[in-house]
Structures are given as structure tokens and as C-alpha cells.
Image: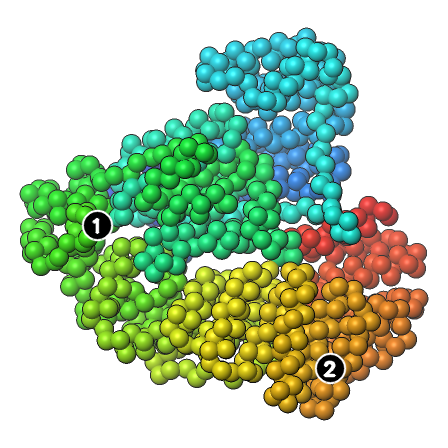
Amino acid sequence: MEFRVLGPVEVWAGTRRIDAGPPRQRGILAALAVDAGRPVAMETVVDRVWGPAASARTRHTLHVYVGRIRRMLDEASGTRLLLRSGGYVLDTDPDTVDAARFRRLLLAARDAGLTDEARAATLREALDLWRGSPLADVPGEWADRVREGWERRRVDAVVAWAQVELRLGRADHVLATVGELVTEHPLVEPLVAVRMRALVAAGRGAEALDAYERARRQLVEQLGADPGPELRDLHQGLLRGDLEPAESAPVAPAVPSARPGTAPPAAVDSAVPAQLPLDVFGFTGRADELAHLDAILATAEEQRTAMVIAVLAGSAGAGKTSLAVHWAHRMRDRFPDGQLYVNLRGFDPTGAAVTPAEAMRGFLDALDAPPDRIPAGLTGQTGLYRSMLTGRRVLVVLDNARDAGQVRPLLPGTPGCFVLITSRDQLRGLVAAEGAHPVAVGQLADDEARQLLTRRIGPARVSADPAAVDAIIRGCARLPLALAVVAARAVTNPGFPLSAVAGELRDARTDLDAFADGDLATDVRTVFSWSYRTLRPAAMRLFRLLGLHSGPDVTAGAAASLAGLGLRETEDLLTELCRAQMVSEHLPGRFTFHDLLRAYASELSRSHDSAPDRSAAVRRLLDHYLHSAVDANRRLDPNREPIPLVPMSEGARHDTVETADEAMAWFALEHPSLLAAVRQADEAGLDAHAWQLPWALSTFNDRQGHWVDQITIMRIALDATRRAGDPRARAVVHRGLALIFSRLARYDEADVHCRHALEIYRTLDDPVGQALSYQNLSWVAGRQLRNDEGLAYAQKALPLFRSTGNTSGQASTLNDIGWFHCMLGAYEEALPACREALSLFEKVDNSAAQANTWDSIGYAHHCRGDHAEAVASYEYAYELFLELGDLYGQAETLDHLGDTYLATGEVDRAREVWERALSTMEELHHADAAQIRAKLRRL
């Protein structure tokens, strides 16, 4: 099945075109196809297809059309249209949609390893997918926005293709393609520039001067702006006569030179992130603010000279986040390279604001930056982030920013990206220095507030009692957050007249003291208190205790532990809190609440819950995170030396995962909450949790390259072990710090921590601990290519492991010894050590370690010139990695196998396995792909 939207909407089953139905049905199909494989909320589908024409019967009509589409898909191919998370999913590979293939081909064309011929062919393939104006037969505002965004993307692709064609000396191809586009888009300076270069390359310099003058006149008349630097420089070069035809084609950017002794940086491909929270159900009003944002974006798209920033500034509860998220969803199609989102928690009542470094790592992970390519410091990470966004159209939403300093490192560096910031602060520094556009978000107008209530409560009840509605609007100070809470109360009690709801709100107001920070806060707190009193006692208690949670969001499992309740009961209570708008389910199964509600919950807990009850709740919560993390870590590293774990409190529960993939996914979702839990344990004086949580996080943080985060929490862990007077725990933490410092090439610090651990283990007369410390010292030495020293440390570790019968330790150390012998050229000594390691790994059934050891054996045979044995060893390693599903291990072994084939003169076989290895490395976005490309180019 193929879905075509880069032109009129078409559906194809093989060579047969399927009737896509009337315009509305084609619109629904298009609205789902552009997000193929991902849920699209019903509200979003309605907004895309009906827009302002939506009515009370629209949802019923949508269901009718969905039924027809399902039947059409079932009869044609079996492709399914599924209901998921309150929306629909077109259950198909995104590559079956031409727009998704277009985006994929554009990403592929950025591959630094491509020749210009291959790059031009890839871009041409992408452009050939276009059959006319996108969604040509779909009416409505959403389709118009999509057309505009995709058309700009097409223009960018044409410019990129033209630049490559000019480098290849094919100016005639360029002129035949771009002339009509320049007429359609006369204000797009890169397009004008590439046509001018093509004219010069064709020996038509006078026409290039005419093209410049025509563009300059139109820019001045329509935008009131002069041409940008590229056009001006081209013009000056033509006037001086020093721009020869051969010089007119832009040169491919050079790769920055590397430091002595290092390889040049490899290109980093990136994913297309889609991090926006769910769109706001029933969003109403804010027409002026939405129009202001639309105008800022339109101007930015016309000029394309700089990255653009808009700042939504307003008081707490004014609806800044809802406005930002809603506008971002409306404009998502204008940013086909992705949408990044982070809640910076700048005004979080716990003070746990997200640091720029934490936010940056989240963005780099979303962009699929390989962990081994991510620099340790924020400055280097910002440089990588900006490089990855160069030439891309990405929307970056920085929600709830405290100040300009929190957001500056997160700003992209080039045109094409749009940054939308929300803050209670006006961020005047950004306005002055970066040219940010301020957009004030005040209270709703009366008619907008009434529209919000109508949308949520229903027109019949609102029109039946206009006086009560006016009283509710006044009582809520026209703030969206407060109005949403009151509307939830009315919806869950359909028998209540609105006059009764208004009366309850008025009575609640007289019972409360004012907040210290003004009348708006007083009004909001009044609404919160009134809504809180309508909850069942168990829901009241859960709401209060949620104020003790320090992370950005919470699962039902964590909430159940916090409250000491069963999972089913907790899920019911969370549903009640969601209905009352006291919390929201911002992602499936993950709950959060507004900063004001968090502060209110925390205040209530301090006044209603005893100190012992609060402490017990925090302990249960930390037990949940600790035991869940330890369980997940076992899936990642089943042979890791265990620690004496803090027992789980009564009433706490932990999550379980079955596979290593599930463990990685669990850690990725819970990572911010786990980091917050470490800090909370430290503040609560729960020293065992404060060091055991970082221990449980270490494998995930190491594999994902979260090394700076790990150092931060391990330092907290070290202080906790000192306070607790637990030397064995302190030694474990020293070893963990040694590993992370070695990852960051801070070898002196790594060495110091190894020796601290070794000294403690000697004092404790712990031979296994000493062996582990010697093993750490050998790894640190090996990373510095001090192979003699590394071998000596490994040889000290081995008898200690043997004396205690520690089979896993013996095996890993023997493999280290074998590897060091290989590095020192002692291949005859390497093989016996590796073979003994292999035998021991088989005894403990460690398949991953067996695979790595077979790879070491293959390397030793290769270096000895015993190529047949090398091939056999590598093939056995590959089979094990295949069984384990270890993609990197498979690719690395194929890479080594190719080296051996090349050494025996089997060039075709070397090419075959290297191409397979390269395909996997590219799938993993791993930096080693560059080395394999280089090998293939040398064949």
C-alpha cells in the first residue's frame, strides 16, 4: 500500500489506484498519513480537516468517515487504522507515504561519505516524488499550512541539488529547473543565489546581474529589506569581474581539522524528533496571540536570514504552555525536520529547575546523537547540537523558562529553526541581545472565557444561566487554569445548575487567606481549594502526597508507592484527579501538574500530613525508584557484582522489565525522575538510597553517554557513603567514578579513585574488591595505551579472583590479559588466555562475553596471519551476537571480518561484509560508520 500526498491525495495498492473518496475523507486520510505509525488525537484530526467549521456533530461524522477508510484499507491491502490513546493510528511503515520518503532521502543526502554524483541522484530521487502542489485536493487552513511548509522544503531541496549539480559542472541542468521556481519564489535569496551562480557558470554574467537587480528591487518593495550577505557578495564579485565561471559553484564545506593524534570528526546523522506533548483538548480563544505568532513565523520564513525566537510571557495560570503547545501542533507540518520540547521547570516550587546541560542531553538523545560522539561539557554539546540542526527546519519549544541564561545554550545557531519560549519573566535580555519577539499572554477576554466554558461544559448549560457564568468568570479571574478546574467540576456533576457551582466558588473564596503575591494568585488558590474539597478523601491524600514528588512527572506505580496503595486503586484515584483537572496525563501513563497546583499540593501536605507520614511516603517513593532501577539494571548487566540492597518498605512496589530493550526504554523514560530522586534522597538524609540509586543508574548512563550526569550523582553518592560511615559502599562509588572519569579521558582523576577503592578494600581484607580495583586500573591504563602497565594490573587481579572462586571475574580478566598481549604483539600468549576466558564464560552462561571473547580470538589469529582461524572465530562471534540481538556487536565483528578477507585478497567478500556492517552502523547512527566508509572507498 502506498499513500501519496505530494500532489493530489492518492492511495495505491501495487499498480492499482484506490478511490480515496470525497474531499473530507481524503482530508482525514491525509491528516493520518502525514503522521503514519503515530497516534493522532481526534481533536487534531477534527482541527486539521474541519477547522473552525467543526460542530457538535463533527465527531460523529469523523467516525463515519473512519469506518469507510477502514473498509477501503481492509479490502485493498489489510493495512489497519487503529484506535490508540484517544486518537487514530494509520498502522503502516512511514516509508509508504511519499512525504516521509522525501524527508528520509533528504536526510540520506546529508551523508558526508556520499560522492557528489550519489548526492545529486539522491536529491533528484526525492524531488521526483513531487506530482504537483501537496494535498492539492484537500481544502482548509491546515492543508494550506502543510502546502506552504512542504513547498519551502522542496525549494530548499532544489537549492541543495543545484549546488551539487554546479559542483559537477552541470549548470544547464540547474537553469532548466530553477528558473520557474525563482519566478514563484522571488524573495527566497538562496534560490536566487544558486540561479545567479548557474548563469555565471554558463557564461551569462550579464543575466546574473539582471537577476540580482530584480531580486534587490522586490526585496526592498515587498519586505523593506536589502539583500543578504550571499547575494551582496555575489553581486560585488560580478561587478569586480573576479568571479570566474569555474568559481561560481559553491565548494563543499571543509571538515574541521582535528587535534594532533585524533581522528577528524565524523558526520552525525540525526533522527526526526516529535517531542511535543499532547495537544490541548478543547483549546479556545487566544486568537490575537495565535495571529501574532503566525505573523512572526511568516516573516521569518520570508527572510530566512536568522533563527527566530518568540517569548510568551505572562503570569502563572495564564495558559502560556497550552497556547505554546496548541500553536506548535498547528504549525508542526511547517517543521518537517522535527519538534523538540522540554519543560525547564523554571518556577518549580521544589527549586528543581532543569539545567541547560540536562535539557541539552535530552535534545541530543532525541536527535539520535551517538553517545560516543557527545562531548562531555555543555559548550561542546551546544556546538554539536547546533551542527546537527544546521540546514534543518526544527521547532524548539522551551517551556517554563526561569531566565535568559537557562535558554541561551539551547538556542539553534542557524536560520530555519523557530524557538518558542514560555516564561513568567519577560526575558528582556533575549529581546535585547537575540532579537526575540515578545508576545504578552494576559487574562482571557470575557468572550474567550465564556467560549472556554461553553466548549467544556456545553452550550445548553452555559446559555441557560448567563449570570452564573459571569460570576464563575469573575471568580476565576479569567485565568484558563482556574476556568478549566471549575469546568471539570461542572462536567462531573451534570445535575448541578451553574448557579450552584458559582455559589460554591463564592463560598470557598470567603474561607481562604490571600496569597502573598497578589489577587490573581488568590483567585487561583480559591478555585484549587474549592475543587480539592470535592475530592474523595483518598484522592485528597494522593494529591497532597504528589506534592512530595520531585520529578517532572509520575507513573501510577510511583504514585502507588508514594501513597502506599494498590496499583488499581491508585489508577482510579489518578483518574479522579484528572477529571477534576488537578493533574493531567500529558503522556500515556505519565501524570504531571501545573507548578501552581504542585505548590498547592505541597502546602496542603505540610499542613495536613504529619512529618512521619511525609517521611514514610518519601521513603516508599525512593524504594520504588531504587528497586525498579536495580531490576532494570540486572537486565542490562546480569553478571555485575551485586550490592547489599536497602529492603523495600511495606506499601512500596517496583516496576519490572523482561528484556534489556525494555530496561533501556524504562531508564530513558524515568531518567529525569531518577536524577531528581538521588537529590531528594540526599536532602532527606536517606544515605543508602543516595548512593545505591547512582549505582543502579551507572550502566544506563554509561551506555547512553550521560557521563556528566553520572559524575554529579556519584559525587552525591560519595558524600552519602562518608556520612553513613560505610567504607565498602564508598569503595564501590570510587570504582564507579573511576570508570566515568576514564570515559571522559580524565585519567588522573580516574587513577586516584581506583587507588582510593583499592586502599579501602585492602583495609577490609576484601580480595574480590581488590581484584575489581586492579581490573579498573588496567582499563584506565589501557585507555591511555599504557599496555604494559595494563597487563601488569590485570595479572594482579587474576590470582585474587581465582582465590575466591569468582568465575566471572576470572573470565573477564583473562580476556583483558589476552587483549593486552595482542596489543603488545604477543599473539601466542594472547590465545591461551582468551581460550581459558571463553571456557569460563561458557560455565557461567554469559553469551555476550563469549561473543566478545571469540572476537578477541579472531583478532589474535588475524594478527598471527592465521586467516582461516580468524574467519572461523569471527563467524562464531557473529552468530552469538545475532542470537543476542546485539546490533553493534554484529557490525563490529563484520568490520573485523572484512579486514581479514582483505588481507587474504578476497576483495569482493571484504566489500560485502563491510557494506553489511556499514548498513547496521548507519541504522545505529554510530560514529564507527565513517571508518567503514573510508575502508570501502579505498577498495
Residue at image coords 35%, 83%: 650
Which SS class for mark 2?
A: helix
Q: Is residue 259 visible?
A: yes
Count neighbours of disc 1 (C-alpha within 10 A) and say few if under 14, some if 14 to 19, many if 20 or more.
Answer: few
Q: Nearer the viewer, residue 342 or 302?
A: 342
Image position of 516 with respect to 668: above or below: above
Image position of 675 with respect to 453: above or below: below
Residue at image coords 72%, 52%: 929
Residue 325 in the image, given as x and y percentages of width and height: 37, 45
Q: Which mark is residue 246?
A: none
Q: Which quadrant of the view contains residue 584? A: bottom left
Residue type highlighted by circle 2: Ala
Q: Which quadrant of the view contains residue 109? A: top right
- Residue beneath disc 2: 797
Residue at image coords 84%, 67%: 823
- On screen, residue 451 versus residue 584, left or right, reads left
Count neighbours of disc 2 (C-alpha within 10 A) and say few if under 14, some if 14 to 19, many if 20 or more.
Answer: many
Q: CA distance from mark 1 to mark 2?
A: 63 Å
Residue 579 in the image, given as x and y percentages of width and height: 24, 59
Q: Is residue 31 visible?
A: no
Residue 642 in the image, given as x and y percentages of width and height: 57, 82
- Residue beneath disc 1: 517
- On screen, residue 333 versus residue 513, left or right, reads right
Which SS class for mark 1?
A: loop
Instruction: Give the image's coloring scheme.
Output: rainbow
Q: Are marks 1 and 2 in contact (CB under 8 Å)?
A: no
- On screen, residue 840 versus residue 381, left or right, reads right
